[in-house]
Amino acid sequence: VDLLMVVAAVVAALIGQVLDGALLIIIFATSGALEAVATKRTRDSVGALLDLAPDRANRIDEHGKETPVDAVQLAVTDLIRVRPGERIAADGVVVEGRSDVDQASITGESLPVFKQSGAEVFAGTMNGTGALVVRVSRRSEDSVVARIVTMVEQASETKAKAQLFIENIEQKYSIGMVTATLLLFFVPLAAGGALQPTLLRAITFMIVASPCAVVLATMPPLLSAIANAGRHGVLVKSAVVMEQLGQTDLIAFDKTGTLTEGRQQVAHIEQAPGAMLDATESLMLAAAVELNSQHPLADAIVSAAGPDVLPHADHFHSEPGRGVRALVAGHRVEVSAPQRLSVPARPSQVRSLDELVRARQQEGMTVVIVAVDGRAELAISLTDKVRPDASAAVADLAGLTTQPPVLITGDNHFAAAALARTVGLQDVRADLLPEAKVEVVRQLEQAGRRVTVIGDGVNDAPAMAAAHLGIAMGRRGADLALDTADAVIVRDELSEVGRVIRLSRRARRVVLANLAMAATVIAVLVVWDLVGTLPLPLGVAGHEGSTVLVGLNGLRLLRSTAWYKSRP
């Protein structure tokens, strides 16, 4: 607890205002404790992020011998081997092997990315079913995941400095109040004033100038709004955040896991030109093969086949970057990416199939081809499922803010543009690594915008920390995103973002009304005490009465109607 607050509380107790003094200590002690807890949790999450990158790596020497070493000992140009299912220990470039790498923790992409010779990989990302040999391109302290940690820490420290301004104002007021009280006591005494009336005037001034009403003018409305939002699935981490939410004038959305659910679904099932089998039969064969696969697309294809019992697949084989194949009901079935299709076809069929695939990819979809007995039979187009309330939420927030929302994502441009068309976004920034997201946010902030970033992943945390505010999706949000964010949407309902912004603005109006009321009462009582004779009981009644009034006015925001009136 700040020393000046202790002094103010002790003086208040000495003049009989024990409850007011205790209230001051409780408020500031609680605020300090919550800030310490939040800081610790963020630091713990930052430390956990570093654990994404493994501590050990298999380094290959010039003779081809593998030696386990600490990841921090890896130097630029060292070769390391990454086996299936292992996390990559360092940023680097693939020099041998092929595999699908899940790099959602860095880029936010919803699907694993195929890597082969010449492709860049990042520390902390998860290798798929293939083995890779990687040439290290950055030391551990310079890796992308390490830079994410640094950006979060630096941005968090900057935000803390901004909050010091509020604390300084409170301290100066307390110092001024104590100083004025002492002057009001000693100066008249030095001028020959009588002790009893001088002491009574000073005590009365200390009571009526006490900032209890001012403190309660601010805290009850904001804390009531926090409690109300919490009951409806929005966790706002502090009163400062609740106040600042209403100042947002631009929303920046992440894509995967925020506007979408982060899981694939089948959007189109189309027969390939010259197909010989029924589309339903081809889909059942494909699902029978994918039932054995661990690829994220497999579940979507199996689900699209429906609840029917699938035929058994023999001799299943998965090849990273190419696809899967097996023998099903006497047929050779292959499910693969279009560019990896290994079946021969007539030139006219190839052109038609290419046109179909190209059209779907330009719509932001992922396309796989089902080949049966060496003949292309089916094209299955998949897409990340858009949240049901995404379009309505985007439209609502666009009407609430002075600037149209923007999409910032690590996903490819086609997928980002397709989603933007679906939900009604115009400004799209795609193919962004975490540091590029931070740069976009900083540019918007430097242009005078108060940006609120909504995301869910580790890759969103630096942008959240750099922005005016960050909001995390709660159900599938990464720990670092949840701890870095200023607010959490527990049920992942985007529509609640607009409501909590409206509630914040309503709370701010109540705060201003309370401050005007408290300041007016304090000013009247102080002037009365200085230029006239204010009876002590009347001073106490006025002080406590204004405190009760502003408190009750703030508590109105606890009512459910305050939340429902925040709907669009």
Image: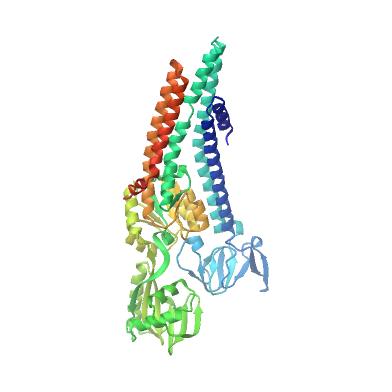
Q: How many marks?
A: 0
Of residues 435 and 222, which is closer to you in this image?
222
Residue 131 locus on image (x, y percent): 57, 74
- The residue at 37%/42% (across/down) is 505
Q: Quadrant of residue 219?
A: top left
Left or right: 337 in relation to 155: left
Up/down of 509 relative to 108, above or below: above
Tell which residue pokes out farthest to the bottom in this image: 330
Quarter containing the N terminus: top right
- The residue at 45%/81% (across/down) is 289
Q: Quadrant of residue 179?
A: top right
Q: Is residue 247 visible?
A: no
Of residues 537 and 88, which is closer to you in this image?
537
Left or right: 29 in relation to 495: right
Q: Is residue 377 visible?
A: yes
Residue 463 locus on image (x, y percent): 47, 52
